[in-house]
Image (tube, helix red, strand yellow):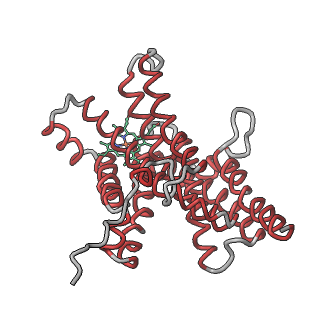
Amino acid sequence: MSSMTAPAPRVSLSAYAPWTDRAGRVSGLKLAAFAATLAPAVWIAWLWASDGLGPKPLTEAIHLTGDWAVRLLAATLAVTPLRLVTRYNRLILVRRMLGLATLAYAAIHIALYCAQQGWEVARIATEIALRFYLTIGFAAFVMLLALGATSNDAAVTRLGAARWNGLHRLVYVIAGLALFHYFLQSKNDVTPAVLWAGLILTLLGHRLLARRGFGRSPLALLGLAAGAGAATALIEAAWYFGRSRLPPLDVLAGNLDFDFEIRPPWIVAAVGLALPLLALAARRFERAR
Ligand code: HEM
């Protein structure tokens, strides 16, 4: 028997850098996504250092990091619809990074909250247990941690594709809880929470269409944009009715007043229009090739 052993496969560390693909080559797409996920943190830190966060910088930073956690969650959920509509499969390269960035911003958000509470563990635990909106945020964070801990190739192999996919479907529960936390902590004005609820609803709606084979149909995607806009208006009306008994018809009518601002349902419908337009552009491009 030969005493020679096969040389251990060489694993290049560069293959693990956030800006390289699996072969260790620099990927422009990953580099751009990495810079984009880092930019808000740098911006918030810069604002803080230059006294640009107002009289309560810690509170403002808690809000900004919470906002970015939700935005990055939406960006993570946008990868699959965009990939399906455009058939630009390389987008999958950035999904894990966006998911981990969501977790990182949520962790900073919570660390800032703990700092605000003077790192008093008993007080923080009591607050989280007693204040419903914090309990909801905590539940979302625990699930995010579970997804973050299993966002690596070793975990996919260990769990097997079916169980891994099942576990990662928790992202829909996380989205629901994070949005609920967003709504609950809003004081009088839920406009930003309504907007992100509508945008995330569009992305989830696309999955339902895709499952029925309409994920690239311009007409179905047009219907999705209109439906998501209408659903956004209904969510807002239902929220204000549940919270303050505001007449739903008055809230719905507010969407037709364009004097001060454009309300979330219109923005959601306009952003949703990007999907049928992208589908048409992708079809043209495929035909031209
Ligand atoms: C233990 C878990 C969490 C704690 C203790 C926590 C704490 C807080 C606090 C104290 C606020 C500000 C409330 C106020 O000023 O009245 C807030 C707002 C917010 N949180 Fe969290 N949070 C948690 C988890 C999360 C998670 C997991 C997300 C998203 C993925 C998130 C997203 C947000 C958002 C979007 C806001 C509103 C920001 C704004 O008003 O601009 N939070 N959270």
Q: Residue at x 58, y 73 (%)?
A: 208
**Is 120 above or below relative to 197?**
above
Q: Which quarter of the rendered picture does the C terminus lie within?
A: bottom right
Closest to the observer: 154 or 160? 154
Residue displayed at 30% across by 72% down:
6
**Residue placed furthest toward the right:** 288
Residue at (72, 66) in percent of width and height: 221
For residue 21, side relative to residue 185 (left or right): right
Nearer to the camera, 127 or 260: 127
Q: Quadrant of the N terminus?
A: bottom left
Left or right of 103? Residue 219 is right
Q: Is residue 168 above or below residue 122?
A: below
Please state the horizontal and vertical placement of residue 88, each as a whole percent of the image. Answer: 66, 63
**Relative height, residue 94 to residue 188 (above, below):** below
User: Residue at coordinates 38% horizontally, 44% vertically from top-left?
Assistant: 104
Q: In the rendering, at what x and y percent does residue 113 appear?
A: 30, 35
Write down the quadrant of residue 223 in the picture: bottom right
Please say if 165 is above or below 18: below
Residue at the far left: name it. 122
Of all residues, the one furthest to the bottom in this rendering is 1
Residue 87: x %, y % from top left: 68, 67
Q: Residue 171, percent across and down? A: 42, 62
**If the picture is divided into quarters, which one holds ligand 1?**
top left
